[in-house]
Image (tube, grey):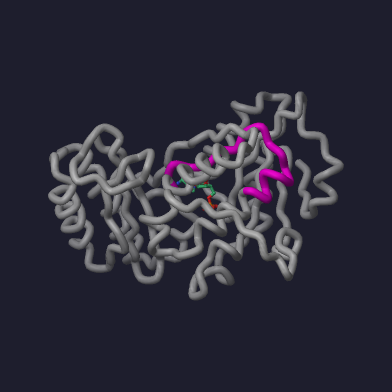
Amino acid sequence: MKIISTAVELRGQSRGEGNRRVLVPTMGALHAGHVSLIRLARQYAGAEGEVAVSIFVNPLQFGPDSDFTHYPRPEAADEETCRAAGVDLIFRPLPNEIFADDHSTYVEETTLSEGLCGSSRPGHFRGVCTVVTKLFHLLAPVAAVFGEKDFQQLAIIRRLVRDLDFPIEIIAGPTVREPDGLALSSRNQYLSAEERAQAPIIRAALLRAAQSPEESARKTLASVREQIESAPLARIDYAEIVGADDLQPRPTIEPRSLLAVAVFFGKTRLIDNILLG
Ligand code: AMP
């Protein structure tokens, strides 16, 4: 497994047989959710292709009062996870390798980014689109794998690739969960024992909404909110029902309606989603 930290070194690398490099972009602190994406990447690349994982905690996608400096960076453990998962190449640049001090060009998707996490985290998706564009240019993969846990991000990346003609296939990986339903996230480790014990309420509320469908989005959202708020430490950031393709709010539940939530437990913000109908 090669570990590379500069663009110059990257240029000299072969990209696997037939240039079949498949990229899994991450911010590190790798868990079984990331590993499932690495497996998908291997399936797509084939045994002779190349699976590349980028590990970059992107300052552009963190807000001013966010956890950027404290975001976990367990370098040795991440290397071990990648090695065990059969990764061929880790690209782990430093921020100044990716962004020049006077960096002043951004990539912005302007429609799908507006609601949901986009309203709570201004500038977040601009940061994501900018860094993903750069990673796509630097690594030039034939495909890239993203998780459905970050459903809005996945939709925005698909739009970015379509709108800017990247010759890159986007592959979606299903959300990997703890046995009690909590979606795996690098941020779960911030939860106190009490918060961790209450966090599975998110998945429970989403599942109940999917299993007992109402016609009205308003009624569904009211019962989702009530159930999540029954956990004393939960504070809902948003709970919305949108079309899974355009991410616009829907008054009634139709095929491909997406129920998406963001919930704070203390300072930790957790997101999850489920398809209804
Ligand atoms: P992150 O390191 O949090 O930026 O995530 C890197 C990639 O892993 C993104 O495409 C995420 O959607 C994906 N991901 C994060 N958590 C999970 C999970 N529990 N299951 C599947 N994919 C995930």
Residue 138 in magenta stretch? yes
Residue 11 vertical placement versus 233 (above, below): above
Location of the N terminus (image quadrant): top right
- Count of numbered badges drawn on the protein: 0
Which residue is rendered at x = 55% and y = 35% of the image? 170
Residue 129 visible at all: yes
Q: Position of residue 191 (x, y in %)?
A: 40, 65
95 shown above or below 200: below
| Residue 141 higher or lower than 111, as above or below | above
Task: Name the residue rendered at 72%, 42% in the picture.
Answer: 139
Q: Which quadrant of the figure has residue 210?
A: top left
Q: Which residues are magenta?
A: 133-150
Quadrant where the C terminus sits is top left
Q: Nearer the viewer, residue 61 or 197?
A: 61
The residue lying toward the viewer, choosing from 29 and 21, is 21
- Residue 123 sits inside the magenta stretch: no
Farthest bottom residue? 65
Q: x and y percent of residue 47 in the render?
A: 69, 24
Q: Residue at x 77, y 34 (%)?
A: 15
Where residue 98 sits in the image (x, y, percent)?
Answer: 72, 59
Residue at 50% across, 69% down: 63
**Which residue of the protein is positioned furthest toward the right in this rendering?**
12
Horizontal arrangement in the rendering, residue 264 relative to residue 9 (left or right) = left
> Is residue 32 among what the camera can see?
no
Location of residue 97 with respect to 248 vertically, above or below? below
Residue 24 rendering spot, x and y as whole percentages: 61, 42
Q: Is residue 7 left or right of residue 253?
A: right
